[in-house]
Amino acid sequence: MISEDDITEIAERLGRACKRHPGVVIATAESCTGGGAAAAITRVSGSAMWFDRGFVTYSNTAKRELLGVPARILMNNGAVSRPVAIAMAEGALANSPAIVSVSITGIAGPTGGSRSKPVGTVWFAWGVRAGLVQARVFRFKGDRVEIRRQAVAVALQGLIDLMGEGPAAALGPGQPNTRSGA
């Protein structure tokens, strides 16, 4: 089980990674975590140097109004989907000066799940301005608190990876990524 201390440690690693990449600024777009990733980031002293803003878009209306997620994408795919996660990450970049973003949309439970999207299904997307957007789905186990904590941890670790500090690196040392692709 992931604790708040574990999340804080990941956020501190993210802060160290950002300091090694001057000019990298982060924005978050969150649904099921309700701002948990932004809260974890801002627990780190000095995060104002690399964190710009967090969008808490719990409702579909908020996703449309604050991030520009197209209504047709929400209607055709549901809020918990790859296209919505991607649109949220792109919307966070379009509506901020951030260089990188992460989006989180899922079902933390205990209600709201279905056979095709059970409780614990969470989609993530990590975006780079003028670059790639990566999306992944996870199926977490546990209660609502545990699912939300796991989601925050994955979101933050994905940002670390994006900056070249982990296995899924997309940014080169000290500079934003400008390539496209998967």
Image (cartoon, grey):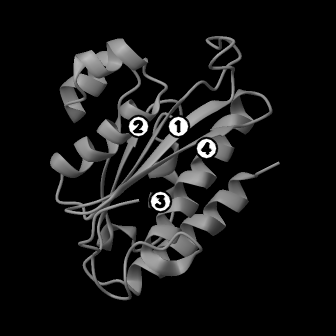
Type of the residue with mark 4: Ala
Q: Residues within 10 Å of mark 3 (few under 14, many from 20)?
A: many
**Disc 1 versus disc 4: nearer the observer:** 1
Question: Vertical placement of 153 versus 160: above or below?
Answer: above
Labels 2 and 4 touching (C-beta < 8 A): no
> Which circle's residue, 2 or 4, is located before the other in the chain?
2
Label 3 and label 2: CA atoms lie apart by: 20 Å
Label 1 sits on residue: 123
Secondary structure at badge 4 equals helix
Name the mark nearer the viewer: 3 or 4. Answer: 4
Q: Depth check: 148 or 137 in front?
A: 137
Q: Residue at x 77, y 28 (%)?
A: 143
Query: Counting residues from the N terminus, which is met first, the one under dot 1 or under dot 3?
Result: 3
Amino acid identity at mark 2: Ala
> What's the distance in space between the residues labelled 1 and 3, CA to CA?
20 Å
Residue 51, x across and y down, in percent? 33, 63
Where residue 85 is drawn, which disc sits there? Answer: 2
**Proximity of marks 1 and 2: CB atoms separated by less than 8 Å:** yes
Name the residue beneath numbered marker 4.
151
Q: Earlier in the sequence, mark 3 or mark 4?
A: 3
Using the numbered discs, state the Cα–Cα distance from disc 1 to disc 2 in whole angstroms.
6 Å
Does label 1 or label 4 sit earlier along the sequence? 1
Report x, y in % for residue 120.
68, 29
Callout 1, which amino acid?
Trp
Residue found at x 58% / y 34%: 122
Q: Quick one: 120 or 96, which is closer to the camera?
A: 120
Q: Which residue is mark 3?
A: 41
Q: Crowding at label 2, few (<14), some or many (≥20) Cα neighbours within 10 Å?
A: many
